[in-house]
C-alpha cells in the first residue's frame, strides 16, 4: 500500500512518520536534490566569489597599468605633460572630435589644453584644462580619477613654487588643513563588498525548500493524493507539521552547504590587496545559522501557505516565484535609504537577519539584545504563518483538485 494513503496504527508517531516519508521520497527526486543541494548552495557562492575576485584583480590591474590619454594641445603645456608621464599617463595623438570619441567609447577620456595656456601661465593667471569623459561609462571612473589627481598635485606644486618665489610660505595658500582619521577596520571595510551576503543566504534557504513545499502541497493536490492522506485517523496539524519539518530540513541543509562553500571559497578572495579582511569561518557560519533558524521556519510556512492556494504544480511555481521577491526587499531598502540600525529593526523578519549578518561581516559581532529581538520577532512571525497555514490544512478545499 502506498505510504501516502496510510499511517501506522500509533497516532503518536504520525508527525515523525510524515517527516521521514517526505524526506525519503524527495531524496529520490533528482530535481529537488539538484535545486536544494547543488544549484543554490554551491553555485551561488562559487559565482559570487569568482565575480568578486575577478572585479578586484581587474581593478588592481587597471590601477597599475599606464593610462593612454589623447592630449589636445600638448605643445602648450610640456611641463604638465611631463608630470602626467611621470604618473603613468601615456599621451596619445590628439583626436579631431573628442566629445564624439568619448561617446563612442573610442577613448575613456581626452585631455584638452587651450592655446592660451602659455600666455596665462607666464602672467601667473589661473589656467584651465579640460577632461572630456562620460561618467556613465564605468571603465572611465578609474582613469579620470587618476588623471585628475595628477593634475591637482601638479597644480599644488606649481602654486607652492610661485609663493616661495614671492617670498611667501606655501602654507599661506592653505590656512585650514583637513586631517582625516578613518576609524574603519579591515573587517568593517569588507561590508562594502560583501553587503549582498544576507540576501544570498536567504535566497539559498528559499530555493532549498521551494520545490519540496510545492510538491508536498500543490503537487500532491494535483496527483489527488491529499484526500486519501487526510482520510487517515491522524490530526491534520500533525500532517502539516511533518511536512513543514521536512521543508525546514531541506532548507537548513541547503544553508549549511552554502555556509561551508563560502567558508572554503572565501580564502580565495584577494581582499588583503584592498586593505580588507573577511572571516567566513566556522564562528561566522554558526552565528548565521542561529540567526536564520526562525527565518527558515517562517519561509517554509509562507511557502506552504502560498502553495496551498495553488491547484497545480505549475501554478504554485508561479506564485512562489513572485514570493521570491520578498527576501530582496531589505537589501533594496538599505541600498536606497542607508539607515542607522536601531534595536527595533532587528525584530523585523528579514531586515533583522540582514543587519545581524552585516554586523558579523564587520567583525563587531551581534549584541545580546539585537540577537534576542531578531530571534523573537522572526519566531513570532513564523508562528503566525504556521497557524494560518494550519487552518488551510483543515479546509476540505485543500484536498480537492481542479
Image: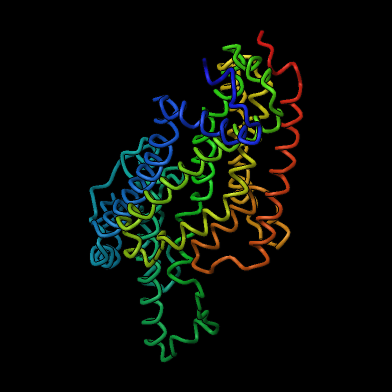
Residue 82 location in percent, x, y? Answer: 24, 66
Picture quadrant where residue 31 is located: top left
Picture quadrant where residue 275 is located: bottom left
Residue 274 location in percent, x, y? Answer: 36, 63
- The colouring scheme, among rainbow, by chain, secondary structure or one colour, is rainbow
Residue 239 location in percent, x, y? Answer: 65, 29
Along the line of sight, the residue nearer the viewer: 160 or 126: 160
**In the image, is residue 286 above or below residue 30?**
below
**In the image, is residue 263 above or below residue 296?**
below
Along the line of sight, the residue nearer the viewer: 294 or 28: 28
Along the line of sight, the residue nearer the viewer: 101 or 15: 15
Residue 165 location in percent, x, y? Answer: 37, 86
**In the image, is residue 164 above or below residue 326?**
below
The number of callouts visible is 0
- If the image is split into quadrants, where does the C terminus sit? top right
Along the line of sight, the residue nearer the viewer: 349 or 133: 349
Q: Residue at horizontal 35%, vertical 38%?
A: 105
Question: In the picture provided, is 213 more to the left or to the right than 83?
Answer: right
Q: Residue at horizontal 37%, vertical 41%?
A: 42
Q: Residue at horizontal 33%, vertical 56%?
A: 269
Amino acid at each position: 500500500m502506498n505510504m501516502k494513503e496510510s499511517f501506522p496504527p500509533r497516532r503518536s508517531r504520525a508527525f515523525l512518520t510524515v517527516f521521514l516519508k517526505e524526506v525519503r521520497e524527495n531524496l529520490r527526486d533528482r530535481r529537488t536534490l539538484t535545486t536544494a543541494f547543488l544549484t543554490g548552495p554551491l553555485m551561488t557562492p562559487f559565482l559570487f566569489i569568482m565575480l568578486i575576485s575577478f572585479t578586484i584583480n581587474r581593478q588592481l590591474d587597471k590601477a597599475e597599468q599606464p593610462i593612454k590619454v589623447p592630449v589636445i594641445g600638448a605643445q602648450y603645456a610640456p611641463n604638465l605633460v611631463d608630470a602626467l608621464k611621470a604618473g603613468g599617463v601615456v599621451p596619445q595623438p590628439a583626436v579631431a572630435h573628442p566629445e564624439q570619441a568619448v561617446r563612442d567609447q573610442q577613448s575613456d577620456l581626452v585631455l584638452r589644453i587651450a592655446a592660451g595656456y602659455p600666455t596665462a601661465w607666464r602672467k601667473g593667471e589661473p589656467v584651465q584644462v579640460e577632461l572630456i569623459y562620460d561618467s556613465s561609462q564605468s571603465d572611465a571612473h578609474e582613469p579620470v580619477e587618476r588623471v585628475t589627481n595628477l593634475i591637482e598635485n601638479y597644480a599644488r606644486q606649481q602654486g607652492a613654487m610661485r609663493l616661495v618665489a614671492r617670498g611667501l610660505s606655501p602654507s599661506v595658500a592653505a590656512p585650514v588643513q583637513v586631517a582625516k582619521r578613518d576609524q574603519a577596520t579591515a573587517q568593517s571595510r569588507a561590508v562594502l563588498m560583501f553587503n549582498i551576503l544576507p540576501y544570498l543566504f536567504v535566497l539559498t534557504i528559499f530555493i532549498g525548500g521551494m520545490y519540496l513545499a510545492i510538491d508536498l502541497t500543490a503537487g500532491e493536490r494535483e496527483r489527488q493524493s491529499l484526500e486519501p492522506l487526510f482520510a487517515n485517523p491522524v490530526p491534520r496539524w500533525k500532517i502539516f507539521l511533518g511536512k513543514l519539518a521536512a521543508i525546514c530540513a531541506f532548507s537548513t541543509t541547503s544553508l549549511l552547504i552554502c555556509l561551508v562553500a563560502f567558508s572554503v571559497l572565501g580564502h580565495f578572495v584577494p581582499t588583503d590587496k584592498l586593505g580588507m579582511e573577511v572571516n567566513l569561518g566556522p564562528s561566522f557560519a554558526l552565528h548565521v545559522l542561529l540567526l536564520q533558524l526562525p527565518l527558515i521556519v517562517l519561509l517554509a510556512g509562507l511557502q506552504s501557505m502560498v502553495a496551498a492556494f495553488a491547484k497545480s504544480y505549475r501554478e504554485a511555481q508561479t506564485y512562489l516565484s513572485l514570493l521570491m521577491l520578498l527576501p530582496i526587499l531589505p537589501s533594496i531598502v538599505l541600498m536606497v535609504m542607508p539607515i542607522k540600525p536601531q534595536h527595533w529593526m532587528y525584530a523585523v523578519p528579514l531586515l533583522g537577519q540582514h543587519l545581524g549578518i552585516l554586523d558579523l561581516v564587520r567583525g563587531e559581532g551581534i549584541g545580546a539584545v539585537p540577537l534576542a529581538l531578531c530571534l523573537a520577532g522572526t519566531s513570532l512571525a513564523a508562528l503566525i504563518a504556521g497557524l494560518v497555514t494550519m487552518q488551510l490544512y483543515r479546509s476540505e478545499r485543500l484536498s480537492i483538485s481542479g
